Image (cartoon, rainbow, N blue to C red):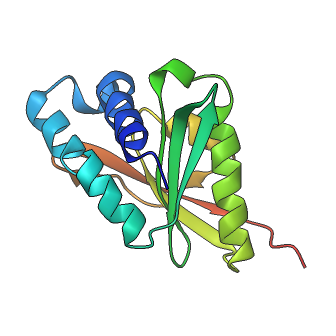
Amino acid sequence: MFDVFGLSRVLTRAITQLCVADHGNDPDKIAAWTANKCPQAVHGWTTSGAPIWLAARNGQVAAVGGVRAPAEISLLYVDPGHAGRGVGAALLSRLEAELTLSGAATVHLMSTKTALGFYRRNGWVAAGQPADWNGIPQFPLRKMLHPSG
């Protein structure tokens, strides 16, 4: 069973503390972004069969990632206390490997302004113009994967 409280905590802390460049500390933007990140909503994700991965460090949830068929990384958030320690890169690699195993050759995601540099350092490239979500820009990115076999 997933630690839905730990997962919810990571999502909320990452959004509120690390994504200031995106929401500008605007309480309405933060509320909209975190509205579906409460433990009850997260529990719904896990019971619906949504593929969710957790990375743990020292017994605590350090990062949360998810994929959506056929070829999308749906979320990747790192707890501020674990940011910059390779946890996000390791989880991103795991998510990419899962999508490769499912047969995806090109994968997509929507990045925050905060995470753009991270994704670019990990081989992701622009895949169109930014989209607006509740006043927060989202940047479409893609990456070619190399399926084994």
Q: Is residue 148 visible?
A: yes
Residue 145 % position (x, y): 73, 65
Q: Foreground: 75 or 117?
A: 75
- Residue at image position (16%, 48%) is 134
Report the number of discs: 0
Farthest-out residue, right: 149
Residue 131 % position (x, y): 29, 55
- Residue at image position (35%, 28%) is 13
Q: Is residue 36 left or right of residue 15?
A: left
Residue 21, image quadrant: top left
Q: Foreground: 79 or 109?
A: 79
Farthest-out residue, front: 1
Image height of 68 relative to 127, above or below:
below
Q: Is residue 113 visible?
A: no
Q: Is residue 70 left or right of residue 112?
A: right
Residue 32 % position (x, y): 15, 44
- Residue at image position (39%, 31%) is 14
Farthest-out residue, top: 81
Residue 25 % position (x, y): 19, 22
The C terminus - image quarter: bottom right
Residue 10, image quadrant: top left
Image height of 5 relative to 1, above or below:
above
Q: Foreground: 65 or 73?
A: 65
Image height of 133 relative to 108, above or below:
above
Q: Is residue 8 left or right of residue 116?
A: left
Farthest-out residue, left: 28
